[in-house]
Amino acid sequence: AQSVSQHNHHVILSEAASLELGCNYSYGGTVNLFWYVQYPGQHLQLLLKYFSGDPLVKGIKGFEAEFIKSKFSFNLRKPSVQWSDTAEYFCAVNAGDKIIFGKGTRLHILP
Amino acid sequence: SQTIHQWPATLVQPVGSPLSLECTVEGTSNPNLYWYRQAAGRGLQLLFYSVGIGQISSEVPQNLSASRPQDRQFILSSKKLLLSDSGFYLCAWSVRWGVGTGELFFGEGSRLTVL
């Protein structure tokens, strides 16, 4: 069955630290990949997406993600985090008509 | 532009009572439609999805059901609620074909408390 794994459930970083959140998926076909963010008390919003082409995609607020097909991974990165990046981050995969989410990573940035 | 409406926003229901959550999409045709349940630490659990009128795929066996009586209408139902049905339910839509497939647009959500 298709699945999405986010390895880090809770991450705590200081401001200006670099961030990498892992995401691996299980699906043998063509995929579209997404990262969504949910800030405290707010609804989900799209952070970035990959459909095809350059496997390194850039999103809003300085985030980027790299699709590595051979590793079935789509890790999220940011070179220098800010306190305002405190949020929950969800990786999602479009496997056929299904869109499956990981369980999320809570990111807490210390000022 | 496309919009998605979901209601009710909150509801409190006794165990054993029925449930109906409704979602409608405007400004697009032939969307894929989805129902998710969001719980802390569990991400978004896909409950049902639909690629067309009357076509429902269930991901999680439980006492919930879904229906799509019209192209842009998606309903989540239960005949008898359980305590474990409490949670935050999200409706979402996606383009069915071509560019943008898989990018989800969410409703405001429905907070269900079963007592």
Image (tube, rainbow, N blue to C red):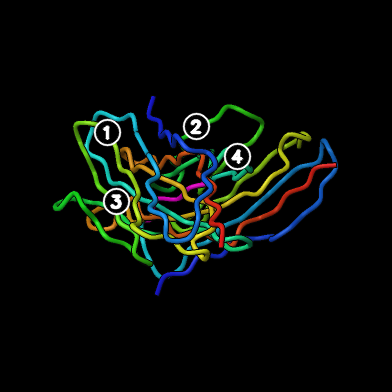
Per the image, the residue denoted by label 3 is A65
> Mark on residue B41?
4
Q: Position of residue A101 (x, y in %)?
A: 45, 41
Q: CA distance from mark 3 to mark 2?
A: 28 Å
Tell me whether circle 4 and circle 1 mark residues in contact (CB < 8 Å). no
Tell me whether circle 1 and circle 2 mark residues in contact (CB < 8 Å). no
Indicate which label's residue lies in the foreground, 1 or 2: 1
Say what amino acid the circle numbered 4 marks.
Gly
Tell me whether circle 3 and circle 2 mark residues in contact (CB < 8 Å). no
Q: Position of residue A16 (x, y in %)?
A: 42, 61
Per the image, the residue denoted by label 2 is B59
Say what amino acid the circle numbered 2 marks.
Glu
Q: CA distance from mark 4 to mark 1?
A: 23 Å
- Residue A100 included in the magenta stretch of the image: no
Count of numbered marks: 4
Look at the numbered disc 1 and give the secondary structure of its residue.
loop
Q: Residues within 10 Å of mark 4 (few under 14, many from 20)?
A: some
User: Are the residues under badges 1 and 2 in a single subunit?
Assistant: no
Q: Chain of mark 2?
A: B
- Residue B33 included in the magenta stretch of the image: yes
What's drawn in magenta, residue-wise?
A: B31-35
